Amino acid sequence: MAWWLLSPMLLVLLVVAGWPLARSVWFSLTDASLTDLSQVSFIGLDNYLSRDEGQWIGLLADPDWWHAVWNTFRFAALSVAIETVLGTVFALVLHAQFPGRAWVRAAVLIPWAVPTIVSARIWGWMLNDQFGVINQGLLAVGLIDQPLAWTADPSLSMVAIVLVDVWKTTPFMALMVLAALQMLPTDCYEAARVDGVPAWTVFWKVTLPLIRPALMVAVIFRLLDALRVFDVIYVLSANGQSTMSMSIYARQQLVDFQDVGYGSAASTMLFMLIAGCVGVYLTLGRVRLGEED
């Protein structure tokens, strides 16, 4: 009965996700070009790695690809970690009773409601080195002595992108954690208050273990988004090597260079890396939860 009930969803997933994925994997094994997809030859794993005149070539031998992998994982680690901490803090504040709490909750969700392209474009203007309000404010208070090229300077571009993403998606983490806090039982908190347990100890020993399953779900959703990040980086820094993600690298090969086979290989590797990271995270989380049980 369970399989019968799941069959419509599985069929839809097979059509809208399975078929495009299988076609991408197939193209990654060919020399397909965007200029003429009718002339396609099977070349095996040459797009991934091959040897030509004594040198290794292909995706796995391309330093630009590995630089994009490093950029993506660095962005994901920084943004998800900061968003998790800030989201938890905001959720704890919004969970408390105070006048106007409903209005504050609605205001916190505004950044999440703004489309990513729109928010990235707004922040691109704000971070502009010539007329951006961020530089003007920092100059006014004396924190900098000259305007900074936030999105053009390789040493600052990743920091700027992480900050923009944190501003955009921290409300999502706060909403997920707040939903978990709303479901917690009150009897354990009443007992802790009667016993005089400090607030930090209550959070660390009671609240955090109880919301950990929901926190894991929130982190996995954000991790999936962060590892396949495209829009915010593309809008703020386009094809800059210092911030190029795996998705932007695949798009560059597919569209700019019109190499469907090589671009599909990059897309397939992106999928495999994301699937591997998610599998490891879920396995470690399940083991940790099992040890606590």
Image (cartoon, rainbow, N blue to C red):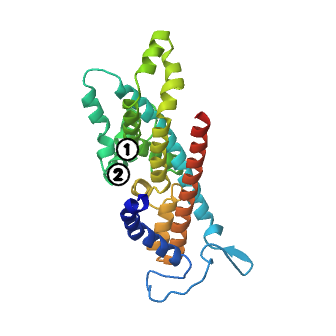
- Give the position of the N terminus as an image quadrant: bottom left
Callout 1 crowding tier (Cα within 10 Å): few <14, some 14–19, many ≥20: many
Image position, residue 244 (x, y; %): 51, 58
Horizontal side of residue 277 vs 215, given as left or right:
right
Vertically, is 82 above or below 228? above
Q: Amino acid at mark 1?
A: Lys
Callout 2 crowding tier (Cα within 10 Å): few <14, some 14–19, many ≥20: some
Vertically, is 106 above or below 71? above
Badge 1 marks a residue whose secondary structure is helix
- Place residue 66 in its image quadrant: bottom right
Inter-mark Cα distance, 1 to 2: 8 Å
Query: Answer yes or no: do the residues labelled 1 and 2 have beta carbons within 8 Å?
Result: yes
Residue 238 in sight here: yes
Q: Amino acid at mark 2?
A: Thr
Vertically, is 60 above or below 110? below
Badge 2 marks a residue whose secondary structure is helix
Look at mark 2 in the image and give the residue it sits on. 116
Tell me, for residue 168, which label it has, or none: 1
**Residue at position x 47%, y 68% from top?**
252
